[in-house]
Image (cartoon, rainbow, N blue to C red):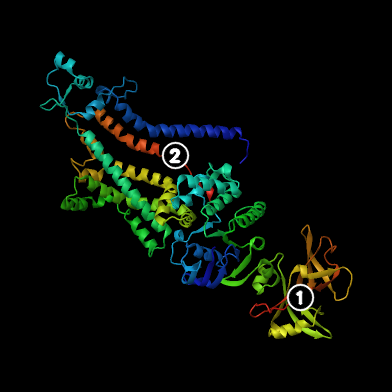
Amino acid sequence: MTQIELRGVQKFFGAVQVIKDLNLKIDDNEFIVLLGQSGCGKTTTLRAIAGLETIDGGDVLIDGKPVQHLKAADRDIAMVFQSFSLYPHMSVYENIAFPLRAMRKSRAEIDGEVRSVAKVLQINDLLGKKPSALSGGDMQRVAIGRALVRRPKAMLMDEPIGALDAKLREEMRAEIKRLHIKQGSTTIYVTHDQIEAMSLADRIVIMHEGVLQQVGSPSEVYKHPANLFVAQFVGSPVMNVAKAAVTMNGSGARVTVDGAAEGFLFPAELVGQLDAANAGQDGLALGIRPEGVMVSREPADGYLPVEAHIIEPLGSYDIVDLKVGAQMLRARTRSGFVGKPGVQVFARLDPAQAHFFDTASGNSLGVRL
Amino acid sequence: MAAVTTSAERSLNKLAIVGVLIVTIIFLAPIYWIASTAFKPRNLATTIPPTVVFQPEISPFVKLFTKRSQLRTAPTPEQYAAAPWWERLVFDGGEKVVRSGRGEVQWSGYPSRFMNSLIVAITSTILAVGMGTFTAYGFSRFKIKGEQDLLFFILSTRMLPPVVVAIPMFLMYRAVGLNDTHWGLIILYTAFNLSFSVWLMKGFMDEIPKEYEEAALVDGYTRMEAFFKIVLPEAATGIAATAVFCFITAWNEYAFALIMTNRRAQTAPPFIPSQVGSGLSDWTVIAAGTFLFLLPVAIFTFLLRNHLLRGMSFGAIRK
């Protein structure tokens, strides 16, 4: 049972504040992913939890006890580094046994535990080798083995698969997930790769410039981004964001993208919800993911005529740039659905997938249709 | 470059090999000269042109280690027959081994000078490399106020040719009773080598990723344990290289050894030339002393050759 809590954590590097008043509670057995661009403070947060970095304010609590004054060695936490950091002068066996030796365990105990971890990770054959003789994936397995063998209170992973090539990364992602389900330990995982975050996390913590932006399950974060940063950071291809204006028109609302002649049809509740959120009409941004832009080749009810620009065929689907007013909206279509650039097609927006943001603050207005 | 070597390239390669051979011969010639003279009979040591082919003998080494005096009268056949084989070699050279009143063989000054050299060089190397390694680790890993200034200060101790301060040092040493002591030379050589050792080791320490220690810290070790279990083995190559350089400097040092020591703590470098011209100068004995003096550095370097040549296995870190 391990809970980790960060309360008002502050960290400065010289004059630069890299963590700004961070509050986060992590439950037992939870797989938390810290997601953000490089330099957003996610790795510093992880290192502060590990005890490799001191903090300038706030508390780090493990199982309710403040640990910020404890040394890394006394926190009973394991860490996997991006560089793997296997000790080059030791064999794989010695690398995995190293944390156990710090605990002054008997030879037989160490041997038993090293072998059982090696079995779980399927690296039994590698025990006698030196790290330099291993492939990237195997080094990574050994690094995880070294972290797991001690059965620590929590596992911290700092971009553990960032150095691997794409195919291996996918394999290792699945393996880490499998291992977490099997071993079940509180895990904090740092990455800048949103696909990794979505596929692994119980909850994703998105950080930007040292500030926590949103915490939520992958689907929450994807479906209801708290602000423009999250909206555009999570999801690939990136969410379309356009300045827009909302007007009432008969029975429904119309959302007109900046520079467009005609607006997309939305349910009338939109206006009420925007009013409730105190949205200023001039600072409104519409966000919609490419899959929320419906495309038709024939005119249909509620569809507006638009011109197709660039088409990116991605195999299972195409991404088509549609010129709407002064903006480009990217739509996701069936592969080959739009014949060639320049043709006229018809588009509408799925109100259920539309997001509205205040352009001044960047925050979501919480519209749900 | 083309994968196929042309005939022009091949002849260029051959030319390069010939060039390397010539340079090697030029460099090895003095060593061969000393080594061969150490095994020559005395009358062949100074012939012109030099004798290249000769019957090697070890009498120079026997003479090197014993105290001898000139024979005024040839030994009687009984004396000759009773003498051990090595003493006969001395008799053959027209000298006799000096014995005490109780008949014990008197040693020459060489073995004790050689021991002094070993004691001083080994101890000062251990001290310089040990302190240098710790200091370099500190500079490499921790934020230190005025780090650059301190490092420059350490380097600046090498900017003055040491001999410039030889006289004041001698007076200071005499005042505190450090002249002609092992510790006197050890402190001096450690001080010579320390700045070099710090700078060289800092380069090696900077090359060791700090993630290794961080991994050890998270794995449950203290920083001290991480230093000894992780950093030191990784720094072995650097330590070996630094030790070789420090040892050579301390082993070869002549000027201060000459000024600061005369008997008890005298090292081999000032002693060997002092044998020239005391009585008859026997070049074969001097060559034997020089030859033996070359060996420790050669052996030390040879033992550490793997560390000196091996590139560090950074394969376990992905950069």
Relative height, residue B89 to residue A271 (above, below):
above
Q: Position of residue B236 (x, y in %)?
A: 42, 46
Point 18% across, 15% down: residue:
B81
Q: Position of residue B42 (x, y in %)?
A: 25, 24
Label 2 sits on a secondary structure element that is helix
The verdict on a common chain for dots 2 and 1 is no
Q: Which of B152/A315 is in front?
A: A315
Relative height, residue A126 to residue A262 (above, below):
above
Question: Horizontal placement of A214 versus B20: left or right?
Answer: right
Q: Which of B214/A146 is in front?
A: A146
Question: Horizontal placement of A353 versus B259: left or right?
Answer: right
Point 20% across, 53% down: residue:
B168
Point 19% across, 30% down: residue:
B107
Asked whether residue B199 is in view, the answer is yes
Residue under pointer 2: B306
CB atoms at circles 2 and 1 under 8 Å apart? no
> Looking at numbered disc 2 in the image, what kind of residue is underneath it?
Asn
Subunit bearing disc 2: B
- Report crowding for label 1: few under 14, some 14 to 19, many 20 or more residues within 10 A (C-alpha): few
